[in-house]
Amino acid sequence: MDERTAAGSPAVVDCEQLVAVIGDAVIVSDPAGAIALWNAAAERMFGFTADEAMGKSLDIIIPERQRQRHWDGYENTMATGETRYGHDLLRVPAVHKDGHSLSIAFTVALLRGTDGAVTGIVAVVRDETARWTEERKLRRRLTDLEAAAQAGVAAAG
């Protein structure tokens, strides 16, 4: 059953418009890891304009300490044509243009040419910095409460 408009004709999705207006960052990189697509949400999230990001390495948003791990996984994905992050959410640190840290979550999909070879990777990215910060505060508070409870038990015994 296909989606239909109110007039009854098949709905047409303008994919270019979808990528431009979606609230999540959409980033496409080529087989070498150069940025080939950078939507408006990516601009807001990471601080780089599309002109600044296009053609640059993904290193512009990857913290230096994470780069080797990232590129090992990226190269493995390019070599095997497989990724486990098409369905599993990947949560990692990232860096904004101004240098401040972000916590992001994303899934990826492999883009393929007519011959089936991987031509790029698309990532759909969400900024989870606020959620991560709040969870970190809650974990700290829980640790403090557990320590206080332990101290109370020890003092009573």
Image (cartoon, rainbow, N blue to C red):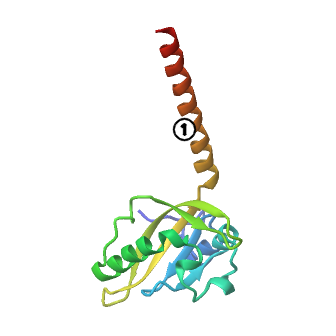
Q: Give percent across and percent down for residue 50.
A: 66, 82
Q: Label 1 is placed on what type of residue?
A: Arg
Q: Nearer the viewer, residue 60 or 140?
A: 140
- Name which quarter of the figure residue 49 lies in: bottom right
- In the displayed structure image, the side of residue 155 where residue 95 appears, left or right: right
Q: Is residue 131 above or below residue 45?
A: above
Q: Nearer the viewer, residue 6 or 100?
A: 100
Residue 10 showing in the rendered view: no
Q: Give percent across and percent down for residue 110.
A: 39, 76
- Name which quarter of the figure residue 148 lies in: top right
Residue that extends furthest to the top in the rendered view of this protein: 156
- Name which quarter of the figure residue 1 lies in: bottom left
Q: Give percent across and percent down for residue 124.
A: 52, 67
Residue 27 showing in the rendered view: yes
Q: Is residue 30 above or below residue 15?
A: below
- What residue did someone put label 1 on? 139
Q: Is residue 74 above or below residue 51?
A: above
Q: How many marks?
A: 1
Q: Is residue 124 above or below residue 113?
A: above
Q: Nearer the viewer, residue 9 or 109?
A: 109
Mark 1, Cα crowd under 10 Å, few <14 / some 14-19 / many 20+, is: few
Under circle 1, the secondary element is: helix
Residue that extends furthest to the left in the rendered view of this protein: 80
Identified at 43% across, 72% down, the residue is 70
Identified at 62% across, 67% down, the residue is 22
Identified at 39% across, 66% down, the residue is 86
Q: Give percent across and percent down for residue 58.
A: 53, 79
